[in-house]
Image (cartoon, rainbow, N blue to C red):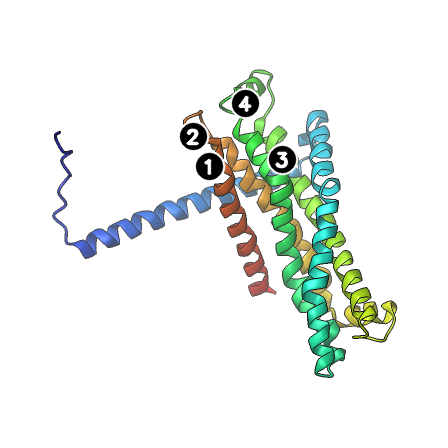
Amino acid sequence: MIARARRYDPRPWPRRALAALGAATISGIGRLLLFVSFATTVAVVAFRREAWRGPVWLEFKRVLHEVAVRSLPTTVVTGMLVGFALVTQAVYWLALTGTTGLVGPVIVILLIRELVPILVGLIVFGRSGTATLIELGEAQPKGWLRQLEIQGLDPLALLVLPRAVAFAVGAFCLATVLLCSTMLTSYFLAYSLELIAYSIWDFADAVLRSMKIQDFIVPPLKCIIIGYMVALTCSTGLGRRDESDELQRLVPRGFVRSALAILLVNTLFDLVA
């Protein structure tokens, strides 16, 4: 057998390593800028009234039902588990040290600002994003995009726009349900274990008094943008050209991209706020 001849590179290995690092950095920045332009385009189109025609509006309602309604059991169970495993433990240790007055600030910082947006993003991707990723991954190999173009329909408006907006609205709704189920579970469990002695209204008042004005704005906005970014990362399944690109690779790739997008949005909000 004749071995394949390698192309000789006369440069020393430090320069080759730097060249490889520079090429990877340029490629990554190019993909990031392409994704930012894609997200900006979808956001601009979403505010155009003429973009919301009959088929787009029907698709939006269908996807919103999938995201916000069908994910309710998963969200409630997740909230109960978080309330049992995390918040109740925080209340327990605060009661043990005699600092139950810090229950409100701990819940605001730990749950409302940080944990709820991340969990909602993971729920949205796991419950609806994977199905969207696989569905859009089949669009080009099976000729759906070509059929839409023949019918004069814009694939961006019909496939991406309603999903992006539905994921954003659905993420906000699920965040509200997740927060309520978590706080109710943590209160009743802590009250039954005699960790706290005040009523549920005093418990809610302690949490509300610990919240600042930005806590009513930033966490909901964070959830909306996380849902929007998850939808856009799942929409990258449209880039699957043919059957040679295995469909099974889309889900792990989409999970990594969605997780990175969730953490990136959460970090940027924390830095700005």
Q: Residue at left 13%, top 35%?
A: 5
Viewer can see residue 225: no
Query: Residue 188 or 244: which is nearer the viewer?
Result: 188
Tag 2: amino acid: Asp
Query: How far, Cα to Cα, is label 4 from label 2?
Result: 17 Å
Residue type of the residue flagged with mark 1 = Arg
Callout in the foreground (4, 2): 2
Name the quadrant of the N terminus. Answer: top left
Kind of element beneath mark 3? helix
Residue pointed to by mark 4: 145
Contact (CB < 8 A) between labels 1 and 2? yes
Categorize mark 1 by other alpha carbons within 10 Å: few (<14), some (14-19), many (20+): few
Residue under pointer 1: 249
* Image position of 42 with respect to 242: above or below: below
Kindly state the secondary structure of the residue where label 1 is placed. Answer: helix
Residue type at mark 4?
Leu
Q: Residue furthest top?
A: 150
Separation of disc 3 and disc 2 at Cα?
A: 25 Å
Q: Badge 3 is on which residue? A: 161
